[in-house]
Image (spheres, helix red, strand yellow):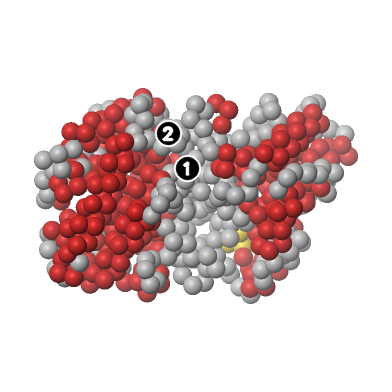
Amino acid sequence: MSQPVLVHWARELVHRISNEIKFEYGLSSMAPSIYDTAWLALVPDRRVGQNRWLFPESFTYLLEHQNPDGGWDTLEQSTRVAKYSDSLWQPDCIIHSLAALLALCQHFRLAACQGSGLPEDALARIFRAKRFLDKKLSAWVLEGTAHFGFELLIPVLLQLLSEEGLSFDFPVKEELLTRYEKASSIDLNWLYDGPCQVPLLSLESFIGKLDFSRLEHLVSNGGIIASPASTAAYLIYAPKWSDKCEAFLRHVVTNGQGQGNGAAGGVFPLEIFEPSWVLTALLENGFTAYNLGLDQVDSILRVIHKSLVEGVTGATHVFLPDADDTSRALTTLNLQGYQISPKGLVDKFEVSHCFETFDSRMPNRVTSVSVNANVLSSFLHGPDPSVFTAQIEKIARFICSQWQAPGRLEDHWNMSEYYGIMHMAQSLILLLVKQAQGALPSISVVSYGLIHDTIPSCLREVLDYLLKNQHEDGSWGQLHCNEETAYAIVALANLGSHLSVVGGNDWKVDLAIAWGKQFLLEHWVPGNKNPDRVWTGKVLHGLVYVGEAYILAALKVNRVNLAGVRGVHPD
């Protein structure tokens, strides 16, 4: 693909974001979720005098996406050559299918009362879904399940289905219900006290525990805490109708990736997270603001800059600030000439050995390699990195220790090990560059071994790992997919740009990158609305804009050009 064509597609992507970021309800390119769509299909239209549904198009979407085996599978496992692991796929199918079956049962019950409104095979669809779920639940193992809040979501759906006359027995049910009792026993009274920015994303999992009549203060232009499913649950269970929640959900259906077909993604909006990730992916890997459109980039930067409060921000204005979104936002701004200190990161998120994702208001603050790498990058792109030498050294040691720990590099936010590896490679290479440029005068005295031994040795191991784990088709990762492959290419280009890491392996790096780019050219379809689902959450998510940005970055990046821009020579 020629450079002008790459620039065209990158420019189109940034233009879409600059337009959508102006919407009252923000933007999110998260791919449709059967789970969230099912909750929309369950919302009654209580404003009319007869029993009707608020989003009949959402129910139609569920019918259209039920598989012949009776289940719903957004991961499309049956058509994949390279499969998701059972620990990811089974709970994903179970969560989506339980919610969709609940919608099917409730629509069937109402239609039976009214005598019309469903396809002729509706009952057969229910039986097929029940058989599918019996099979999946009987094979499910709790250990290794990484879906956020599954121990709350699945028991609540099972209870709601039991009220429709469907019961399920399976080997781990007792253990699951024990976990539910423990997880749901937390004190929720604080939710009644005022606005909430904690990214719970699943208030619907506390049905039976929460008094929805006392949650009106949670309603915002992000629905209920940026969750379409939670917003739908509020409309179902709150005694007072919310026009604001209805308007929010209609925007999600109309302007989300479903584009009016009834589908909803899992989180909406993400008006800070997505633009920050897209712009950093593009600007750090060879695109310029001129390539992307100066006016469009500037309009996005103004929104990101405005979101900073005391130097920190979150994925959306609806959420609490976090270290990940703050660091990417700061890097985005500082790459384009802003001079914003990362001091807010230190004040809010630094702990003894690293940086944690959230501050003390979150019960689970989350430690992550990718988050720490992004924090490190934001320090290094800041106006004076030397001010934060102690934090820079701390993060670098933490990242290297995580690589050296036994087992696969795991990340909280993304199922691909190559996501963490990419951010690790980018940040540690940038650290070596900044130190060589004299931007960190004290680090070379205090931590000579870190700069000249620990980091280069660690990155050489990472480079060797990437070269050894490329598949025969040129891809990387468990799924042989575009987004994982893009992560690996960006990592390789950064590692290959520094002589102390690449050594005499430059030709191997160039070959692997070329092979990976060829894979992307053969498999990537520009503008594809079905992204790789590699982002973790209640279910596995795909992000159209972020995935496209990393693929474009991978196709654009050049290790020699990276070295030239940074004033180092890889050859």
Answer with left or right where residue 316 lies relative to residue 40.
Answer: left
Q: Which amino acid lies under the numbered mark 2 shown in the image of this protein? A: Cys
Q: Position of residue 21 (x, y in %)?
A: 43, 51
Q: Position of residue 443 (x, y in %)?
A: 18, 67
Answer with left or right where residue 413 lies relative to residue 112.
Answer: left
The disc, 2 or 1, on the residue closer to the chain's N-terminal end is 2
Residue at 53% from the left image edge and 38% from the top image edge: 85
**For the residues marked 2 and 1, what is the alpha-carbon distance in whole angstroms?**
10 Å
Regarding residue 21, the answer to whether it shows in the image is: no
Pick whichever, 150 or 214, lies toward us: 150
Answer with left or right where residue 128 lies relative to residue 19.
Answer: right
Quarter of the image holding residue 136?
Answer: top right
Label 2 SS: loop
Residue at 68% from the left image edge and 58% from the top image edge: 179
Residue highlighted by disc 1: 534
Residue highlighted by disc 2: 481
The residue carrying pointer 1 sits among few (fewer than 14), some (14 to 19) or many (20 or more) residues within 10 Å by Cα, namely: many
Report if the CB atoms under discs 2 and 1 are less than 8 Å apart: yes
